[in-house]
Image: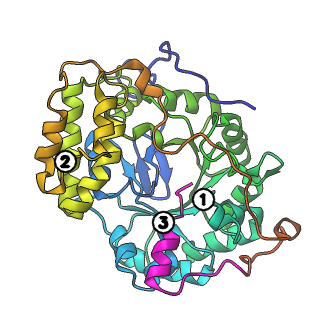
Amino acid sequence: MDSAPLQDSSDPPARSGPDGVQEEFAPLSLGSLKVWPPVLLAPMAGVTNPPFRALCRAAGAPLCVTEMVTARGYLMGNRRTREMTRPAPGERPHSIQVYGTDPRDLRKLAGILADEGVDHLDLNLGCPVPKITRQGGGSAICVRPRLVGRLVAALVEGVEEAGRQVPVTVKMRKGIDDDCLTYLDAARAAQEAGAAAVGLHGRTAAQLYSGLADWGAIAHLKQELSIPVLGNGDVWQGVDALRMMRRTGCDGVIVGRGCLGRPWIFRELAALFDGRPAPAEPNLGQVLEVLFDHGQRLIDHLGPATGLRQMRKWITWYTKGFPGCAALRGQLFGREAPPVSAGLDGLRELLGGLDPTAPYPPAALRVKRGKGSRTQRVRLPAGYLADRTSDRAHKECAAPRSDAELEAWEQNLSGG
Protein backbone atom coordinates (compact mmCIF):
# COMPACT_ATOMS: atom_id res chain seq x y z
CA MET A 1 0.00 0.00 0.00
CA ASP A 2 1.44 3.38 -1.05
CA SER A 3 0.56 5.69 1.81
CA ALA A 4 1.08 9.34 2.61
CA PRO A 5 4.61 10.11 3.84
CA LEU A 6 5.48 12.18 6.86
CA GLN A 7 6.25 15.88 6.56
CA ASP A 8 9.39 16.75 4.61
CA SER A 9 10.28 20.44 4.85
CA SER A 10 12.36 20.19 1.68
CA ASP A 11 9.24 20.06 -0.52
CA PRO A 12 9.30 23.34 -2.47
CA PRO A 13 6.37 25.59 -3.39
CA ALA A 14 4.79 25.13 -6.81
CA ARG A 15 7.13 25.93 -9.67
CA SER A 16 6.73 29.23 -11.50
CA GLY A 17 8.35 30.46 -14.68
CA PRO A 18 10.68 33.48 -15.01
CA ASP A 19 7.68 35.77 -15.45
CA GLY A 20 6.11 34.49 -12.23
CA VAL A 21 3.37 32.53 -14.00
CA GLN A 22 2.50 29.24 -12.33
CA GLU A 23 3.62 26.41 -14.60
CA GLU A 24 3.55 23.26 -12.45
CA PHE A 25 -0.17 23.01 -11.65
CA ALA A 26 -3.30 24.05 -13.52
CA PRO A 27 -6.62 25.32 -12.16
CA LEU A 28 -9.09 22.55 -11.40
CA SER A 29 -11.81 22.40 -14.06
CA LEU A 30 -15.23 21.27 -12.85
CA GLY A 31 -17.39 21.84 -15.89
CA SER A 32 -17.55 25.61 -16.27
CA LEU A 33 -16.04 26.18 -12.80
CA LYS A 34 -12.33 26.98 -12.64
CA VAL A 35 -10.94 26.47 -9.14
CA TRP A 36 -7.61 27.99 -8.07
CA PRO A 37 -5.82 26.91 -6.07
CA PRO A 38 -7.09 23.38 -6.90
CA VAL A 39 -8.34 22.81 -3.37
CA LEU A 40 -11.76 22.07 -1.85
CA LEU A 41 -12.96 22.24 1.73
CA ALA A 42 -14.42 18.79 2.45
CA PRO A 43 -18.04 18.43 3.56
CA MET A 44 -18.06 17.64 7.28
CA ALA A 45 -21.14 17.24 9.47
CA GLY A 46 -21.29 19.80 12.27
CA VAL A 47 -18.27 21.60 10.81
CA THR A 48 -18.76 23.10 7.36
CA ASN A 49 -21.65 25.36 8.29
CA PRO A 50 -21.74 28.98 7.03
CA PRO A 51 -19.53 30.41 9.85
CA PHE A 52 -16.68 27.99 9.21
CA ARG A 53 -17.02 28.18 5.43
CA ALA A 54 -16.75 31.98 5.71
CA LEU A 55 -13.53 31.68 7.75
CA CYS A 56 -12.04 29.27 5.22
CA ARG A 57 -13.05 31.46 2.27
CA ALA A 58 -11.48 34.49 3.94
CA ALA A 59 -8.26 32.48 4.27
CA GLY A 60 -8.27 31.61 0.57
CA ALA A 61 -10.36 28.43 0.16
CA PRO A 62 -11.84 28.74 -3.35
CA LEU A 63 -14.58 26.08 -3.06
CA CYS A 64 -16.21 25.18 0.26
CA VAL A 65 -18.70 22.31 0.35
CA THR A 66 -21.63 22.41 2.77
CA GLU A 67 -22.52 19.83 5.32
CA MET A 68 -24.23 16.89 3.65
CA VAL A 69 -27.97 17.24 3.07
CA THR A 70 -30.37 14.41 2.28
CA ALA A 71 -32.61 14.55 -0.76
CA ARG A 72 -35.51 13.12 1.19
CA GLY A 73 -35.11 15.64 4.02
CA TYR A 74 -35.12 18.54 1.61
CA LEU A 75 -38.12 17.26 -0.34
CA MET A 76 -40.01 16.67 2.92
CA GLY A 77 -39.50 20.36 3.67
CA ASN A 78 -37.42 19.73 6.79
CA ARG A 79 -36.39 23.14 8.11
CA ARG A 80 -32.91 22.15 9.25
CA THR A 81 -32.09 20.40 5.97
CA ARG A 82 -33.23 23.36 3.90
CA GLU A 83 -31.27 25.80 6.02
CA MET A 84 -28.08 23.84 5.33
CA THR A 85 -28.48 24.40 1.58
CA ARG A 86 -28.56 28.19 1.89
CA PRO A 87 -25.36 30.02 1.01
CA ALA A 88 -23.75 32.45 3.38
CA PRO A 89 -23.90 36.11 2.28
CA GLY A 90 -21.67 36.57 -0.75
CA GLU A 91 -20.79 32.87 -0.96
CA ARG A 92 -19.78 32.07 -4.51
CA PRO A 93 -19.33 29.50 -5.81
CA HIS A 94 -22.01 27.79 -3.74
CA SER A 95 -21.33 24.07 -3.33
CA ILE A 96 -23.65 21.51 -1.70
CA GLN A 97 -23.06 17.86 -0.86
CA VAL A 98 -26.19 15.75 -1.28
CA TYR A 99 -27.14 12.21 -0.36
CA GLY A 100 -29.88 9.91 -1.57
CA THR A 101 -30.51 6.37 -2.79
CA ASP A 102 -33.58 7.06 -4.94
CA PRO A 103 -32.77 8.53 -8.38
CA ARG A 104 -36.18 10.21 -8.51
CA ASP A 105 -35.46 12.13 -5.32
CA LEU A 106 -32.01 13.19 -6.51
CA ARG A 107 -33.30 14.31 -9.90
CA LYS A 108 -35.98 16.47 -8.33
CA LEU A 109 -33.58 17.88 -5.73
CA ALA A 110 -30.98 18.76 -8.36
CA GLY A 111 -33.53 20.67 -10.39
CA ILE A 112 -34.71 22.68 -7.39
CA LEU A 113 -31.18 23.51 -6.21
CA ALA A 114 -30.14 24.46 -9.75
CA ASP A 115 -33.11 26.84 -9.94
CA GLU A 116 -32.03 28.34 -6.62
CA GLY A 117 -28.57 29.08 -8.02
CA VAL A 118 -26.28 26.34 -6.71
CA ASP A 119 -22.93 26.24 -8.53
CA HIS A 120 -21.75 22.70 -7.70
CA LEU A 121 -23.29 19.47 -6.43
CA ASP A 122 -21.30 16.68 -4.80
CA LEU A 123 -22.85 13.23 -4.26
CA ASN A 124 -21.90 11.44 -1.05
CA LEU A 125 -20.95 7.83 -1.79
CA GLY A 126 -18.51 7.45 1.09
CA CYS A 127 -20.41 7.46 4.39
CA PRO A 128 -19.01 4.55 6.49
CA VAL A 129 -21.49 4.72 9.39
CA PRO A 130 -22.90 1.26 10.33
CA LYS A 131 -26.51 2.42 10.59
CA ILE A 132 -26.27 3.54 6.95
CA THR A 133 -24.17 0.78 5.37
CA ARG A 134 -26.20 -2.02 6.91
CA GLN A 135 -29.17 -0.69 4.92
CA GLY A 136 -27.14 -0.60 1.70
CA GLY A 137 -26.48 3.14 1.82
CA GLY A 138 -23.35 5.28 2.05
CA SER A 139 -20.18 3.41 1.09
CA ALA A 140 -22.27 0.33 0.34
CA ILE A 141 -23.76 2.04 -2.72
CA CYS A 142 -20.42 1.70 -4.52
CA VAL A 143 -20.72 -2.09 -4.30
CA ARG A 144 -23.28 -1.66 -7.10
CA PRO A 145 -21.71 0.41 -9.91
CA ARG A 146 -24.90 0.43 -11.96
CA LEU A 147 -26.70 2.06 -9.04
CA VAL A 148 -23.91 4.66 -8.83
CA GLY A 149 -24.49 5.41 -12.50
CA ARG A 150 -28.23 5.86 -12.01
CA LEU A 151 -27.77 8.23 -9.07
CA VAL A 152 -25.20 10.38 -10.86
CA ALA A 153 -27.28 10.45 -14.04
CA ALA A 154 -30.30 11.58 -12.04
CA LEU A 155 -28.43 14.59 -10.67
CA VAL A 156 -27.04 15.48 -14.10
CA GLU A 157 -30.49 15.22 -15.68
CA GLY A 158 -32.02 17.34 -12.92
CA VAL A 159 -29.68 20.28 -13.46
CA GLU A 160 -29.95 20.00 -17.23
CA GLU A 161 -33.75 20.13 -17.04
CA ALA A 162 -33.38 23.34 -15.03
CA GLY A 163 -31.37 24.82 -17.87
CA ARG A 164 -28.21 25.23 -15.76
CA GLN A 165 -24.65 24.06 -16.19
CA VAL A 166 -23.95 22.78 -12.70
CA PRO A 167 -21.08 20.29 -12.38
CA VAL A 168 -21.88 17.09 -10.48
CA THR A 169 -19.04 15.35 -8.66
CA VAL A 170 -18.92 12.32 -6.37
CA LYS A 171 -16.94 11.55 -3.23
CA MET A 172 -16.22 7.93 -2.39
CA ARG A 173 -13.90 5.67 -0.44
CA LYS A 174 -11.67 2.85 -1.69
CA GLY A 175 -14.25 0.26 -0.78
CA ILE A 176 -15.80 -1.71 2.04
CA ASP A 177 -12.52 -3.21 3.23
CA ASP A 178 -9.30 -4.46 1.66
CA ASP A 179 -11.11 -7.58 0.41
CA CYS A 180 -13.87 -5.57 -1.27
CA LEU A 181 -12.44 -2.59 -3.16
CA THR A 182 -15.11 -0.79 -5.15
CA TYR A 183 -13.64 2.55 -6.20
CA LEU A 184 -12.49 1.71 -9.73
CA ASP A 185 -15.79 0.28 -10.99
CA ALA A 186 -17.85 2.88 -9.14
CA ALA A 187 -15.74 5.77 -10.45
CA ARG A 188 -15.97 4.48 -14.03
CA ALA A 189 -19.74 4.29 -13.68
CA ALA A 190 -19.86 7.84 -12.35
CA GLN A 191 -17.76 9.08 -15.24
CA GLU A 192 -19.97 7.36 -17.81
CA ALA A 193 -23.06 8.89 -16.20
CA GLY A 194 -21.74 12.42 -16.55
CA ALA A 195 -19.81 13.19 -13.37
CA ALA A 196 -17.45 16.15 -13.75
CA ALA A 197 -14.91 14.71 -11.27
CA VAL A 198 -14.42 11.95 -8.72
CA GLY A 199 -13.07 12.59 -5.22
CA LEU A 200 -11.39 9.60 -3.56
CA HIS A 201 -10.74 9.30 0.16
CA GLY A 202 -7.82 6.88 0.29
CA ARG A 203 -9.32 4.74 3.05
CA THR A 204 -11.90 1.98 3.16
CA ALA A 205 -15.11 2.14 5.15
CA ALA A 206 -13.58 -0.40 7.55
CA GLN A 207 -10.68 1.97 8.26
CA LEU A 208 -12.94 4.90 9.11
CA TYR A 209 -10.28 7.58 9.76
CA SER A 210 -7.51 5.35 11.10
CA GLY A 211 -4.07 4.66 9.72
CA LEU A 212 -2.62 6.38 6.67
CA ALA A 213 -4.51 7.22 3.50
CA ASP A 214 -3.57 5.16 0.46
CA TRP A 215 -2.31 7.70 -2.05
CA GLY A 216 -1.46 4.84 -4.41
CA ALA A 217 -5.18 4.25 -4.93
CA ILE A 218 -5.59 7.91 -5.90
CA ALA A 219 -2.78 7.54 -8.45
CA HIS A 220 -4.37 4.35 -9.82
CA LEU A 221 -7.73 6.04 -10.22
CA LYS A 222 -6.13 8.97 -12.03
CA GLN A 223 -4.72 6.54 -14.59
CA GLU A 224 -8.14 4.99 -15.17
CA LEU A 225 -10.31 8.10 -15.64
CA SER A 226 -10.41 10.89 -18.20
CA ILE A 227 -12.23 13.31 -15.85
CA PRO A 228 -10.45 15.07 -12.96
CA VAL A 229 -9.60 13.07 -9.86
CA LEU A 230 -9.51 14.75 -6.43
CA GLY A 231 -7.41 13.24 -3.67
CA ASN A 232 -8.52 13.18 -0.04
CA GLY A 233 -6.69 11.96 3.04
CA ASP A 234 -3.81 13.11 5.26
CA VAL A 235 -3.45 16.69 4.09
CA TRP A 236 -2.36 18.16 7.41
CA GLN A 237 -0.19 20.99 6.07
CA GLY A 238 -0.16 22.89 2.82
CA VAL A 239 2.90 21.05 1.58
CA ASP A 240 0.99 17.75 1.83
CA ALA A 241 -1.38 18.90 -0.92
CA LEU A 242 1.50 19.65 -3.29
CA ARG A 243 3.13 16.34 -2.44
CA MET A 244 -0.12 14.45 -3.07
CA MET A 245 -0.53 16.03 -6.50
CA ARG A 246 3.11 15.43 -7.40
CA ARG A 247 3.02 11.79 -6.34
CA THR A 248 -0.40 10.81 -7.68
CA GLY A 249 -0.97 13.14 -10.62
CA CYS A 250 -4.40 14.03 -9.21
CA ASP A 251 -6.05 17.25 -10.36
CA GLY A 252 -7.03 18.67 -7.00
CA VAL A 253 -7.08 18.06 -3.27
CA ILE A 254 -9.90 17.84 -0.74
CA VAL A 255 -8.94 19.12 2.72
CA GLY A 256 -10.84 17.65 5.67
CA ARG A 257 -9.57 17.20 9.23
CA GLY A 258 -6.37 19.14 8.50
CA CYS A 259 -8.30 22.42 8.68
CA LEU A 260 -10.11 21.74 11.99
CA GLY A 261 -8.92 24.50 14.28
CA ARG A 262 -6.59 25.64 11.49
CA PRO A 263 -8.65 27.44 8.80
CA TRP A 264 -5.51 29.40 7.89
CA ILE A 265 -4.21 26.25 6.17
CA PHE A 266 -5.95 27.65 3.08
CA ARG A 267 -3.77 30.77 3.25
CA GLU A 268 -0.80 28.43 3.34
CA LEU A 269 -2.15 26.48 0.36
CA ALA A 270 -2.78 29.64 -1.66
CA ALA A 271 0.79 30.80 -1.10
CA LEU A 272 2.40 27.47 -1.97
CA PHE A 273 0.35 26.97 -5.13
CA ASP A 274 1.25 30.49 -6.22
CA GLY A 275 4.92 29.65 -5.81
CA ARG A 276 5.46 31.62 -2.59
CA PRO A 277 6.77 30.33 0.76
CA ALA A 278 4.14 29.33 3.30
CA PRO A 279 3.42 32.05 5.88
CA ALA A 280 4.48 31.46 9.46
CA GLU A 281 2.10 29.69 11.79
CA PRO A 282 0.19 32.07 14.11
CA ASN A 283 1.10 32.46 17.76
CA LEU A 284 -1.48 31.76 20.46
CA GLY A 285 -2.75 35.34 20.53
CA GLN A 286 -3.45 35.25 16.80
CA VAL A 287 -5.10 31.85 17.15
CA LEU A 288 -7.40 33.22 19.85
CA GLU A 289 -8.38 36.11 17.59
CA VAL A 290 -9.56 33.59 14.98
CA LEU A 291 -11.24 31.49 17.69
CA PHE A 292 -13.28 34.42 19.02
CA ASP A 293 -14.16 35.54 15.50
CA HIS A 294 -15.41 32.01 14.85
CA GLY A 295 -17.35 32.04 18.12
CA GLN A 296 -19.12 35.29 17.26
CA ARG A 297 -20.04 33.94 13.84
CA LEU A 298 -21.49 30.79 15.41
CA ILE A 299 -23.52 32.83 17.89
CA ASP A 300 -24.85 35.05 15.10
CA HIS A 301 -25.77 31.98 13.04
CA LEU A 302 -27.06 29.56 15.67
CA GLY A 303 -27.94 31.74 18.64
CA PRO A 304 -26.01 32.12 21.93
CA ALA A 305 -26.83 28.75 23.52
CA THR A 306 -26.15 26.50 20.51
CA GLY A 307 -23.27 28.61 19.25
CA LEU A 308 -21.43 28.50 22.57
CA ARG A 309 -22.03 24.77 22.94
CA GLN A 310 -20.49 24.23 19.51
CA MET A 311 -17.51 26.37 20.49
CA ARG A 312 -16.42 23.80 23.05
CA LYS A 313 -15.19 21.34 20.44
CA TRP A 314 -13.63 24.16 18.42
CA ILE A 315 -11.66 25.42 21.42
CA THR A 316 -10.12 21.97 21.87
CA TRP A 317 -9.09 21.98 18.20
CA TYR A 318 -7.76 25.55 18.07
CA THR A 319 -5.67 25.25 21.23
CA LYS A 320 -4.29 21.75 20.68
CA GLY A 321 -0.71 21.46 21.88
CA PHE A 322 -0.34 24.95 23.40
CA PRO A 323 1.10 25.02 26.96
CA GLY A 324 -1.56 25.14 29.67
CA CYS A 325 -4.48 24.57 27.34
CA ALA A 326 -5.21 20.96 28.25
CA ALA A 327 -6.34 21.92 31.77
CA LEU A 328 -8.48 24.75 30.43
CA ARG A 329 -10.13 22.46 27.92
CA GLY A 330 -11.09 20.21 30.83
CA GLN A 331 -12.92 23.13 32.46
CA LEU A 332 -15.03 23.59 29.34
CA PHE A 333 -16.83 20.32 30.02
CA GLY A 334 -16.89 20.41 33.81
CA ARG A 335 -18.84 22.19 36.50
CA GLU A 336 -16.62 25.26 36.15
CA ALA A 337 -17.55 25.82 32.51
CA PRO A 338 -18.69 29.40 31.86
CA PRO A 339 -22.50 29.62 31.73
CA VAL A 340 -24.17 30.46 28.43
CA SER A 341 -25.22 33.78 29.93
CA ALA A 342 -21.54 34.76 30.12
CA GLY A 343 -21.30 34.58 26.32
CA LEU A 344 -17.95 35.06 24.63
CA ASP A 345 -16.79 37.16 27.57
CA GLY A 346 -16.87 34.02 29.69
CA LEU A 347 -14.66 32.21 27.21
CA ARG A 348 -12.30 35.18 27.02
CA GLU A 349 -11.98 35.14 30.81
CA LEU A 350 -11.34 31.40 30.80
CA LEU A 351 -8.56 31.75 28.21
CA GLY A 352 -7.29 35.12 29.42
CA GLY A 353 -4.45 33.72 31.51
CA LEU A 354 -2.68 32.14 28.56
CA ASP A 355 0.50 33.59 27.08
CA PRO A 356 -0.52 35.18 23.75
CA THR A 357 3.08 35.18 22.53
CA ALA A 358 3.38 31.37 22.76
CA PRO A 359 4.51 30.07 19.35
CA TYR A 360 2.48 27.51 17.49
CA PRO A 361 3.60 24.04 18.68
CA PRO A 362 5.11 22.14 15.71
CA ALA A 363 3.87 18.81 17.10
CA ALA A 364 0.27 20.05 16.86
CA LEU A 365 0.44 20.52 13.09
CA ARG A 366 -0.10 16.85 12.39
CA VAL A 367 -2.20 15.91 15.41
CA LYS A 368 -5.45 14.31 14.28
CA ARG A 369 -8.50 16.32 15.21
CA GLY A 370 -12.12 15.26 15.00
CA LYS A 371 -12.65 11.59 14.16
CA GLY A 372 -10.80 8.95 16.17
CA SER A 373 -8.45 6.20 15.09
CA ARG A 374 -10.59 3.10 15.56
CA THR A 375 -11.52 0.66 12.80
CA GLN A 376 -14.72 -1.30 12.28
CA ARG A 377 -16.26 -4.33 10.69
CA VAL A 378 -18.58 -2.87 8.06
CA ARG A 379 -22.21 -3.90 8.36
CA LEU A 380 -24.00 -4.74 5.12
CA PRO A 381 -27.46 -6.18 4.40
CA ALA A 382 -27.62 -9.97 4.34
CA GLY A 383 -26.61 -11.26 0.92
CA TYR A 384 -25.77 -7.76 -0.35
CA LEU A 385 -22.42 -8.71 -1.87
CA ALA A 386 -24.04 -11.53 -3.87
CA ASP A 387 -25.96 -9.03 -6.02
CA ARG A 388 -23.39 -6.47 -7.16
CA THR A 389 -24.90 -6.02 -10.62
CA SER A 390 -28.16 -4.53 -9.37
CA ASP A 391 -28.97 -0.93 -10.31
CA ARG A 392 -31.31 -0.44 -7.35
CA ALA A 393 -30.81 0.42 -3.72
CA HIS A 394 -31.32 -2.32 -1.17
CA LYS A 395 -34.96 -2.84 -0.25
CA GLU A 396 -34.24 -1.99 3.41
CA CYS A 397 -32.68 1.37 2.50
CA ALA A 398 -35.90 3.13 3.43
CA ALA A 399 -36.15 6.89 3.81
CA PRO A 400 -37.37 8.39 7.09
CA ARG A 401 -41.01 9.41 7.15
CA SER A 402 -41.09 12.16 9.80
CA ASP A 403 -38.96 15.17 10.72
CA ALA A 404 -37.96 13.61 14.05
CA GLU A 405 -36.98 10.31 12.41
CA LEU A 406 -35.16 12.19 9.66
CA GLU A 407 -33.08 14.36 11.98
CA ALA A 408 -32.12 11.38 14.15
CA TRP A 409 -31.12 9.52 11.00
CA GLU A 410 -29.20 12.43 9.45
CA GLN A 411 -27.06 12.78 12.58
CA ASN A 412 -25.54 9.39 11.76
CA LEU A 413 -24.41 10.40 8.29
CA SER A 414 -20.82 11.31 7.51
CA GLY A 415 -19.46 13.27 4.56
CA GLY A 416 -17.16 10.32 3.81
For the residues labelled 3 and 2, the Cα–Cα distance comes to 27 Å
Considering depth in this image, is 39 or 141 the residue closer to the camera?
141
Q: Is residue 343 magenta?
A: no
Residue named by callout 2: 338
Q: Secondary structure at mark 1?
A: loop
Q: x%, y% of residue 239?
A: 47, 25
> Which residue is outermost to the right?
386
User: As rendered, which of 188 and 105 lies closer to the eye?
Assistant: 105
Q: Position of residue 406 (x, y in %)?
A: 49, 78
Q: Earlier in the sequence, mark 3 or mark 2?
A: 2
How far apart marks 1 and 2 lie (CA) works out to: 35 Å
- Asked if the residue under mark 2 is in contact with the one under mark 3, i.e. CB atoms within 8 Å, the reply is no
Residue located beneath label 3 in the image: 411
- Nearer the observer: mark 1 or 2; the answer is 2
x and y percentages locating residue 24 in the rendered image: 50, 28
Q: Position of residue 311 (x, y in %)?
A: 28, 49
Q: Is residue 348 above or below residue 87?
A: above
Residue 127: which numbered mark, if any?
1
Q: Amino acid at mark 2?
A: Pro
Circle 2 SS class: loop
Mark 1 or 3: in front is: 3
Inspect this view and state whether residue 73 appears: yes
Q: Residue furthest front?
A: 335
Say if 218 sits above or below 268 in the image: below
Q: Residue at x 62, y 35 (%)?
A: 249
* Mark identifier at residue 21: none
Which secondary structure class fits the magenta region best?
Answer: loop
N-terminal-most mark, 1 or 3: 1
In what element is the residue under mark 3? loop
Range drawn in magenta = 396-416
